[in-house]
Image (tube, grey):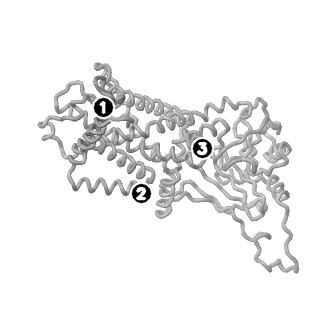
Amino acid sequence: MSIPELERDTAFAETVSSAAAKDSPPPRAFRPLIMRLHFYAGILVAPFLLIATISGGLYAIAPTIEQFVYSDYLHVDSTGPAVPVAEQIRAAQQERPDLIVAAVRPATDPGETSRVLFTDPSLGESERLAVFVDPATAHSVGELVVYGSSGALPMRTWIDQLHRNLHLGEPGRVYSELTASWLWVIALGGVYLWAARYRTMRARGTTTARLWTLDRVSRGRNRTLSWHGVAGIWIAAGLVFLSATGLTWSTYAGQHVSDLRSSLSWTTPTITKALGNTPDSAPAGDHGGHGMTHAAEPAANITAANVGRIDSVLALARENGVTGKVEASIPSTTDTALTVAQTRQPWVMANNSIAIDGATGTVTDILWFADWPLAAKLSAWGIQAHMGILFGLANQLALVALACALVSVIVRGYILWWRRRPTRNTMRPVGRPPMRGAWRRVHPAAIVAVVAGAVVVGWFVPLLGLSLLAFLLVDGVLGTLQTPIFSSAVSSLRRLK
């Protein structure tokens, strides 16, 4: 739910009346412990979370923004029937004869351009060069670099890399994984603390207790606390969702997720592209009854042949139910089928694909989304919702609203911390953390369970485990520095000087 600690009045935060404590159920003993964890996690992780939140909100709305930023590439004014897709591809090849065509995304709506995608060795991983073609005239309207299966254009790609790795490459992904690893912990801890505070206030008979609504009567720090808690509890489920889906992309926890899905047969199935019984795939020594080897056909000739077959392949795909916006691959080898796959689009809940032998027009494989394992479907939907694609503009606006709410929670968390600072006779510039000794209030059996759970979660989400260990070490050092013995020794040294 939140970032720095869920504050309350000092007396309320540190001392609960004996009568209230007596009536409280055992789980309330965890509140000081969760408060301390929530505080330190919020203070140290919130700066990274703030960057991820702002960049994530921008990325969510980017698909809509790029429709305006790149309108000259995406839209044309010409009307009339579209020329064959093969002709559109050849027009793009004339623009970039130095590159090998890899796929095409034909236009499906009036005024929309087709994308002819080329493999460019000079580009980065998952990047391709797209030549945008007017389908009515087969004239190129420009070219841009596109990224990933979503076909992100340069602006969205730049925001995506900022959100993912701060433009630092693979090492920078540690920041986003650390953020995703702690987000659900901070959110659920905040929900627990806010609900516990509400229960205690109700038990005391406080009439201003609020759980889901803002306390509009209070002012100053209490008003800030109310907004921090109420906004946090409303967005907690969304934060847990973003954390879970974000971890599937991560480096370390993501690998554990992939391993778990593989062991449970929950992986996303893939279509079979390989073709059998082709001259290039004949066994060594088998020359089809002739006393000579088969001469390999140049890749350029194979690509040209597959370009000529693309319209019939697309028609066959439509006949078999693979319709709508699709991407058709154009292989440069004879042992690879042409594949037509539905692309990720708003309100499209299924992504089917088909493999076709271009030489014979034979369907060699069909992969229906309905046949995917449930976990694979949920993963696909979750990723699309995280990216702001699944439900179109409504999805994007919801993510932007979630980002704005989270930024307000983070900022108010820091304001609460600042306002708690001592103002008289002290050298402390900021608010102090919650009271130490939280472990002493928890039953030993519960401590064992908590530690065991932390070890398991820390193994599955490594950056969470390592950073938690670092928090404990820092907290232990700070606790040592605050002991009477250490303070007395420091005072003695100062007197000697």
Q: How many residues crowd mark 1 within 10 Å: few (<14), some (14–19), many (20+)?
A: many
Q: Residue 10, how many percent across, how many down?
A: 24, 30
Q: In the picture provided, is 344 more to the left or to the right than 144? A: left
| Residue for badge 2 | 459
Give whichever of 307, 143 is nearer the camera.
143
Label for residue 7? 1
**Relative to 403, residue 188 above or below:** below
Q: Which residue lies at the image location 67% right of the left edge and 30% below the top edge?
A: 69
Please indicate whether residue 374 sits to the left or right of residue 5 in the image. Answer: right
Which mark is on residue 168? 3
Helix, strand or loop for disc 1: loop
Question: Dividing the picture into quarters, in which one does residue 42 lie?
Answer: top left
Residue 447: x and y, percent?
25, 53
- Circle 3 residues within 10 Å: few <14, some 14–19, many ≥20: few
Which of discs 2 and 3 lies nearer the camera? The answer is 3
Label 2 vs 1, first from the N-terminus = 1
- Within 10 Å of the Cα at label 2, are there few (<14), some (14-19), or many (20+) other Cα atoms? some
Q: CA distance from mark 1 to mark 3?
A: 35 Å
* Identity, as a three-letter code, of the amino acid under mark 2: Trp
Q: Amino acid at mark 3?
A: Leu
Q: Is residue 291 left or right of residue 352?
A: right
Label 3 sits on a secondary structure element that is: loop
Looking at the rendered structure, the secondary structure element under dot 2 is helix
Q: Residue furthest front?
A: 496
Disc with the residue nearer the chain's start (1 vs 3): 1
> x and y percent of residue 452 in the render?
32, 57
CA gap, disc 2 to disc 1?
31 Å
User: Which amino acid type is marked by label 1?
Assistant: Glu
Q: Residue at x 40, y 44 (%)?
A: 184
In front of the other: label 1 or label 3?
Answer: 3
Residue 205 placement: quadrant? top left
Per the model, the C-alpha gap separating discs 2 and 3 is 26 Å
